[in-house]
Amino acid sequence: MPKIIFLPHKIILPNGAKLQAKEGETILNVALRNHIKLEHACEQSCACSTCHCIIRKGFLSLSGWSEKEDDILDKAWGLESESRLSCQAIIGNMDIEVEIPLYNINSITEY
């Protein structure tokens, strides 16, 4: 089983987390199953960028991305070449390391 390492996020996950994942599930589903409050305003329909994450290790292990995901990612704050929408990124058979950006397009709380 692949593992997901969530790097520390000062609000959502101060200590980070190392979680078991199942091949074929999304990063967002792993986070939600483990009570990580990763925002997802469009309920996983690939219509917003609130679940944006950055893959620090294992990027090539994830599923490919669609043109729609690419278009939505253009709206994300802090976009990087290894950015993905966690609701669309399907986990392969390798471990990955994920960074949750401090801000997203829906941020209304000042951290």
Image: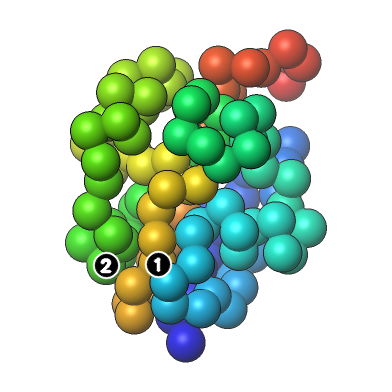
Q: Amino acid at mark 1?
A: Ile
Q: Which tag, 2 or 1, sits closer to the chain's start?
A: 2
Q: Using the image as rendered, state which of residue 45 and residue 32 is in the foreground.
A: 45
> Which residue sits furthest front?
45
Q: Residue at x 60, y 73 (%)?
A: 19
Residue 10, quarter of picture? top right
Residue 76's spot in the image, x, y percent?
Answer: 42, 22
Q: What separation in Å lies between label 2 and label 1 (alpha carbons)?
A: 7 Å
Q: Amino acid at mark 2?
A: Ser
Tell me, yes or no, if residue 16 can be seen here: no
CB under 8 Å between callouts 2 and 1?
yes
| Left or right: 33, with 93 as reference point | right
Residue 51's spot in the image, x, y percent?
Answer: 54, 37
Label 1, secondary structure: give it: loop
Residue 109's spot in the image, x, y percent?
Answer: 76, 15
Number of callouts in the render? 2
- Applied colour scheme: rainbow
Tell me, yes or no, if residue 38 can be seen here: yes
| Residue 98 against residue 41 in the figure, above or below | below
Q: Residue at x 23, y 53 (%)?
A: 64
| Residue 90 against residue 47 in the figure, above or below | below
Q: Which label number is shown at residue 91?
A: 1
Q: Using the image as rendered, state which of residue 15 and residue 42 is in the foreground.
A: 42
| Left or right: 105, with 15 as reference point | left
Local crowd size for mark 1, using a 10 Å CA cut-off: few (<14), some (14–19), many (≥20):
many
| Left or right: 66, with 92 as reference point | left
Label 2, secondary structure: give it: helix
| Residue 35 against residue 105 in the figure, above or below | below
Residue 33's spot in the image, x, y percent?
Answer: 72, 64
Q: Residue at x 57, y 52 (%)?
A: 28
Q: Residue at x 46, y 54 (%)?
A: 98
Residue at image mark 2: 61
